[in-house]
């Protein structure tokens, strides 16, 4: 899972850094990341989907900065920053002996061979896809939500199991999403299926914010200052809401008994709406 978590960290840090860049959005953003590890033919194809609002908070936290209607962040810049962050941390994982290599990759355990491998990675153009969702925001959220408890292949794609072989349907996107049937041995099918089973306790979803303490400097603003500023701003908005709600209440309905105080700002709670149990 070391590389999967690296994929989460590098992609999130890339989005936060480029969004804050004075040449681009100049805003603090948040994002929802979802890890997918499989392709249609069950081969290992790890990638991260990121759901990002079309804008973010200004760096001083005073206003919302909207992205251009048909443009968010430049994909070429995103791909280069992502490549740099991923390869730099990949090197650190190997130096710290947190990366295990086996099988055909065993030769990468040799430092000189690993350095050559990193140079090869850095020489390539990395792919970052950033487009508005085709069916709208609600469609893409529903699409990703279906994957929160989904495995690599569902029963309806299984065609047959005979002669110690498994056949299943898959879409070949390289051939215009043409539907095909693939047959592999039972052992190979199990191997492909099990590489997508996450270890116990592992997560394939992550929520990242520029204010999160899990995002290290220089990719985030000072958490304490940001939280303090946000609290003051939110308290001001709540005070306005409290005044408007109380002014709308009749004197007979106004509460005079003691109301509990919030532990952080010490202001009184105001119940705006209590959902039915």
Image (tube, rainbow, N blue to C red):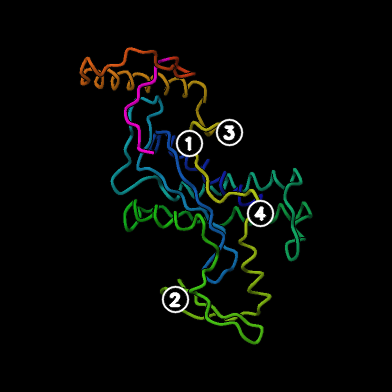
Viewer-nearest residue: 173 or 185:
185
Q: Which residue does the numbered mark 4 point to in the structure image?
A: 199
Q: Nearer the viewer, mark 2 or mark 4?
A: 4
Q: Is residue 244 left or right of residue 231?
A: left
Residue name at image x 65 percent, y 53 percent: 119
Q: CA distance from mark 4 to mark 3?
A: 25 Å
Q: Which residues are magenta?
A: 267-277
On residue 197, the disc is none
Circle 4/circle 3 CB separation < 8 Å: no
Mark 1 surroundings within 10 Å by alpha-carbon count, few (fewer than 14), some (14 through 19), many (20 or more): some
Circle 2/circle 4 CB separation < 8 Å: no
Q: Secondary structure at mark 4?
A: loop
Q: Secondary structure at mark 2?
A: helix
* First-in-chain label (3 vs 2): 2
Task: Assign the C terminus to one quadrant of the image.
Answer: top left
Circle 1/circle 4 CB separation < 8 Å: no
On residue 175, the disc is 2
* First-in-chain label (4 vs 3): 4
Q: Position of residue 23 (x, y in %)?
A: 40, 37
* First-in-chain label (2 vs 1): 2
Q: Position of residue 41 (x, y in %)?
A: 54, 72
Q: How many marks?
A: 4
Mark 3 surroundings within 10 Å by alpha-carbon count, few (fewer than 14), some (14 through 19), many (20 or more): few
Mark 4 surroundings within 10 Å by alpha-carbon count, few (fewer than 14), some (14 through 19), many (20 or more): few
Q: Which residue does the numbered mark 1 point to in the structure image?
A: 209
Q: CA distance from mark 1 to mark 4?
A: 25 Å
Q: Farthest residue toward the right?
A: 110
Q: CA distance from mark 1 to mark 3?
A: 11 Å
Q: CA distance from mark 3 to mark 2?
A: 42 Å
Q: Which residue does the numbered mark 3 point to in the structure image?
A: 216
- Asked if the stretch drawn in magenta spans residue 268, the answer is yes
């Amino acid at each position: 899972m070391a590389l999967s978590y690296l994929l989460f960290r590098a992609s999130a840090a890339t989005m936060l850094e480029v969004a804050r860049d004075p040449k681009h959005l100049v805003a603090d953003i948040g994002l929802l990341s979802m890890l997918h590890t499989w392709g249609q033919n069950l081969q290992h194809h790890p990638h991260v989907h990121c759901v990002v609002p079309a804008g973010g908070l200004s760096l001083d936290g005073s206003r919302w900065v909207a992205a251009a209607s048909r443009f968010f962040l430049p994909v070429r810049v995103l791909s280069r920053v992502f490549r740099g962050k991923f390869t730099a941390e990949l090197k650190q994982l190997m130096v710290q002996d947190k990366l295990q290599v086996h099988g055909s990759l065993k030769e990468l355990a040799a430092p000189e061979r690993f350095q050559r491998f990193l140079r090869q990675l850095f020489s390539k153009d990395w792919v970052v896809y950033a487009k508005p969702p085709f069916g709208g925001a609600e469609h893409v959220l529903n699409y990703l939500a279906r994957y929160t408890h989904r495995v690599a292949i569902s029963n309806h794609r299984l065609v047959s199991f005979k002669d110690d072989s498994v056949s299943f349907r898959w879409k070949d996107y390289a051939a215009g999403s043409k539907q095909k049937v693939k047959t592999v041995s039972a052992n190979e099918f199990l191997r492909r299926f099990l590489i997508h089973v996450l270890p116990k306790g592992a997560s394939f979803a992550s929520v990242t914010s520029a204010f999160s303490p899990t995002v290290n400097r220089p990719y985030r603003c000072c958490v304490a200052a940001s939280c303090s500023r946000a609290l003051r701003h939110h308290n001001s908005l709540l005070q306005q809401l409290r005044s408007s709600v109380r002014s709308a209440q009749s004197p007979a309905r106004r509460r005079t008994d003691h109301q509990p105080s919030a532990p952080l700002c010490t202001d009184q709670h105001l119940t705006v709406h209590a959902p039915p149990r």
